[in-house]
């Protein structure tokens, strides 16, 4: 299980951010979130200041997971694209590789077609990065230092007081 | 799966509260949410039915602050306890780093506890996890009720594996933090063990060029900022976006042949800003409906009044648009606007930027009037008739 730990370096995040920023510009979308299927936020781009991205990431992952289950019940392996339409803002979610979700928030300044087109291109680029990252993590396998757990233990007592 | 992000310097772990229906999983989270300091917790999200039964999951993010330069974040989830929600219950377990099993101590609930525990093992097995190898903490909850089983009996029936167990009363909070602290310790221990098992040393010596994001030695580079509150998870990340777009624009502007491109991109941004400003309104409404009031207050402060986003330059852009020559040229109603006070009032009212944009051009009148007034003023001043 620990082999699946999601470890991402600055270098990859910079690459991903560039790709997402380019997509946002091209598709004229408001913001993009890259979310792990477990609900962890990997990175975000665009106007996300007003959004609670932590909660959003958890909910997007939950939404995607339940849709996957629906797909399984109707005999599909997975719905790879999900679209939520609102009055003004819409969300387009698509699968990136096998463990990430790209969510793009956009409004009526652009169209679902544009977003879908750019999201598809972006997903293909991101998959390459994730594949490279996986091999990199396997060769380097860094992680939490010993003192991390120890220091955390001390800190917990301060925070969690009845 | 522990998520380690070297770019945002975050370590995120997922802890799931499992157990039969009405055993007190959501109550656990609510108590933690109520008692933990404001800067440490995020917004608690509850996907529940109208009868307040958990439908999908409850979610509470906790940030215990910087440790070795990394922000340690824990995402607490609960599952729906009712038997027929197994499909969604299984989904929540995905990627869990640790489990807190909340058992109901009442004598007549023992069968449900056992059933739920078996269900947990099955669901974990479907993801390829082994419950015996995972960090698990047991809670014997509702110890304050009269018809409870003895701890020894519960231990013998639920805990042959020898998991750490706590007697708790989730409503009053007895034992809630103890079990939370224990599961966090177990999760971090497990993460450390698995990492050190994979790598001989915590700091790989290879690839020195990329060591900017390595765990040790990071403290020196960290700014002495206090633990980041969860509502704005990583404020440092945002400028990166603005910076790149600014860079791009700077790159585009100097060559003369690119001026067309530059103009269109600028125009796009200008037209984008007011629309975004209007879009802020439903956001706020949504937050008011769902979020606790304290958080709305926090949001409101950061929104500002006329800026759609903190740090936005939309005000400047609007002002720039106002005096565009093209706006003035196409106006057919210049002479119609006779009341200067009304016009100026409209002019200053920036609550509806888009509507104002669509008006024929009421902005025409005040500027004209101002120019005329000024001319008259100078004529009078100079004594010219």
Image (cartoon, coloured by chain):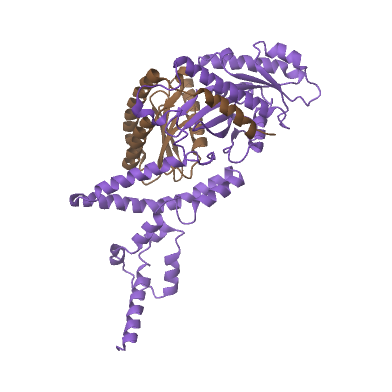
Chain colours: A brown, B purple
On the rendered structure, is B67 left or right of B352? Answer: right
Q: Nearer the viewer, residue B363 or A78?
A: B363
Single out the residue that lies furthest toward the right. B146
Q: x, y (%) of residue A69?
A: 49, 23
Q: Nearer the viewer, residue B272 or A17?
A: A17
Q: Residue at x 53, y 15 (%)?
A: B129
Count every numbered label the image shows and give the total: 0
Query: Eyeballing the image, is A1 above or below B301?
Result: above
Q: Residue at x 66, y 18 (%)?
A: B164
Q: Nearer the viewer, residue B64 or B256?
A: B64
Q: x, y (%) of residue B237?
A: 42, 40
Quadrant of the image for the C terminus of chain B?
A: bottom left
Single out the residue that lies furthest toward the left. B257
Query: Eyeballing the image, is A75 above or below A16?
Result: above
**Residue A29 visible from this viewpoint:** no
Q: Residue at x 50, y 30 (%)?
A: B68
Give the quarter of the image for residue A25: top left
Q: x, y (%) of residue B193?
A: 52, 17
Q: Residue at x 44, y 43 (%)?
A: A89
**Residue A157 visible from this viewpoint:** yes
Give the quarter of the image for residue B88: top right
Q: x, y (%) of residue B90?
A: 55, 21
On the rendered structure, is B232 left or right of A9? Answer: right
């Amino acid at each position: 299980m620990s082999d699946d730990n999601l470890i991402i370096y600055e270098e990859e995040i910079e690459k991903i951010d560039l790709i997402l920023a380019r997509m946002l510009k091209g598709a004229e979308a408001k913001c993009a979130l890259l979310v792990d299927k477990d609900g962890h936020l990997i990175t975000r781009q665009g106007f996300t200041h007003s959004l609670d991205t932590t909660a959003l990431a958890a909910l997007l992952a939950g939404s995607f997971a339940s849709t996957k289950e629906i797909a399984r019940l109707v005999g599909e392996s997975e719905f790879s694209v999900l679209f939520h339409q609102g009055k003004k803002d819409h969300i387009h979610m698509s699968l990136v590789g096998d463990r990430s979700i790209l969510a793009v928030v956009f409004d009526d300044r652009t169209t679902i077609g544009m977003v879908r087109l750019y999201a598809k291109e972006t997903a293909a680029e991101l998959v390459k990065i994730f594949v490279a990252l996986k091999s990199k993590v396997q060769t380097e396998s860094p992680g939490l230092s010993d003192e991390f757990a120890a220091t955390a233990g001390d800190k917990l007592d301060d925070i969690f007081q009845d | 799966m522990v998520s380690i992000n070297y770019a945002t310097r975050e370590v995120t772990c997922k802890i799931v509260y499992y157990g039969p229906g009405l055993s007190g999983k959501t109550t656990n989270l609510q108590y933690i949410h109520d008692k933990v300091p404001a800067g440490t917790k995020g917004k608690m999200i509850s996907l529940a039915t109208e009868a307040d039964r958990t439908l999908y999951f409850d979610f509470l993010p906790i940030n215990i602050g910087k440790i070795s330069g990394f922000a340690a974040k824990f995402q607490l989830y609960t599952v729906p306890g009712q038997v027929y929600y197994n499909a969604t219950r299984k989904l929540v377990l995905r990627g869990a780093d640790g489990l807190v099993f909340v058992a109901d101590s009442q004598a007549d609930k023992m069968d449900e506890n056992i059933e739920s525990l078996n269900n947990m093992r099955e669901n974990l097995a479907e993801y390829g996890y082994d419950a015996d190898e995972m960090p698990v903490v047991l809670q014997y909850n509702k110890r304050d009720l009269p018809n409870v089983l003895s701890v020894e009996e519960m231990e013998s029936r639920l805990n042959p594996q020898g998991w750490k167990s706590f007697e708790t009363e989730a409503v009053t909070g007895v034992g809630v933090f103890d079990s939370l602290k224990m599961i966090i310790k177990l999760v971090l221990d497990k993460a450390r063990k698995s990492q050190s098992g994979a790598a001989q040393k915590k700091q790989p010596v290879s690839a020195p060029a990329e060591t900017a994001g390595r765990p040790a030695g990071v403290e020196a580079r960290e700014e002495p900022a206090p633990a980041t509150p969860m509502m704005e998870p990583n404020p440092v990340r945002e400028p990166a976006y603005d910076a790149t777009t600014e860079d791009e624009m700077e790159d585009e502007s100097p060559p003369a042949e690119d001026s067309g491109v530059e103009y269109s991109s600028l125009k796009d941004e200008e037209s984008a800003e007011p629309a975004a400003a209007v879009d802020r309104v439903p956001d706020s409404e949504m937050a008011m409906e769902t979020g606790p009031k304290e958080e709305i207050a926090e949001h409101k402060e950061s929104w500002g009044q006329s800026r759609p986003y903190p740090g936005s330059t939309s005000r400047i852009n609007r002002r720039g648009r106002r005096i565009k020559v093209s706006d003035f040229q196409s106006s057919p109603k210049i002479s119609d606007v006779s009341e200067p006070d009304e016009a100026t009032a409209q002019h200053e009212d920036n609550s509806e930027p888009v509507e104002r944009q669509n008006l024929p051009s009421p902005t025409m009148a005040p500027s004209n009037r101002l120019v005329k007034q000024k001319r008259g003023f100078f004529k009078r001043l100079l004594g010219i008739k």
